[in-house]
Amino acid sequence: MRPTMSDETTRLEIRPAVSQDYEVLRDLFTHLIPNDLAMTDDRGRAALNGMLSHPGLTTLIGFHDGVAAATCTLIVIPNFTRGGAPYAVIENVVTRKDYRGKGLGEQLLRHAQDLAWASGCYKVMLLTGADNHGAQRFYEKVGFKQSKTGYQIRAPGYPKRAMKE
């Protein structure tokens, strides 16, 4: 059974992103990585269009009263194990700072999970920073369990960002 959302929950209108959402997403991601690596608009639009055309990848945007308040990306990945059932990864989860604590991120992640289950996925995974305790508590509240250990390796030049609580 799913954990219940906060009493402060406000309804979120959720839809897949389209290429015209470039500016909306660019703004939302400043709430995730304020000092992200610089990217020209041409490169950003090309990246978004590449994402939108990638099979199995859906970037969701949640709107509250017409304001883009939250986003995440769901990637459904074909699989050779588990009877051929795909699995999903959720990445780039962010809620605007002024909309946090209202249950919007919960609604968005539950919607992403529902899409994964409708696609036949047997699990949904996500990663968060080992030092990002606030995000860890949030994901646990939404029902995710820490059951595996994640590893990553970054290309040279991609710095780790410092987390602030």
Image (spheres, rainbow, N blue to C red):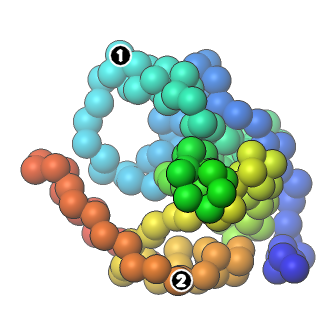
Q: Position of residue 134 (x, y in %)?
A: 52, 79
Q: Nearer the viewer, residue 82 or 153?
A: 82
Q: Nearer the viewer, residue 5 or 143?
A: 143
Q: Position of residue 116 (x, y in %)?
A: 71, 52
Identify which residue is drawn at 64% across, 23% down.
18
Amino acid on which the number 2 mark rests in the picture: Gln
Identify which residue is drawn at 39% across, 79% down.
149
Quarter that holds the C terminus: bottom left
Q: Nearer the viewer, residue 47 or 96?
A: 47
Amino acid on which the number 1 mark rests in the picture: Asp
Q: Evaluate whether residue 97 shows in this view.
A: no
Element at label 2? loop
Quarter that holds the N terminus: bottom right
Mark 1 residue crowding within 10 angstroms, few (<14) / some (14–19) / many (20+)? few
Identify which residue is drawn at 67% across, 41% down.
60
In the rendering, which numbered label is found on residue 128?
none
Q: Evaluate whether residue 158 shows in this view.
A: yes
Figure check: 98 above or below 2 = above
- Gap between marks 2 and 1, in whole Å? 38 Å
Locate residue 62: give its quadrant. top right
Q: Position of residue 122 (x, y in %)?
A: 68, 62
Looking at the rendered image, the disc whose residue lies closer to the viewer, 2 or 1, is: 2
In the rendering, which numbered label is found on residue 146?
2
Which residue lies under the disc numbered 1? Answer: 42
Locate residue 102: give its quadrant. bottom right
Q: Reading the chain from its start, which is encountered first: label 2 or label 1?
A: 1
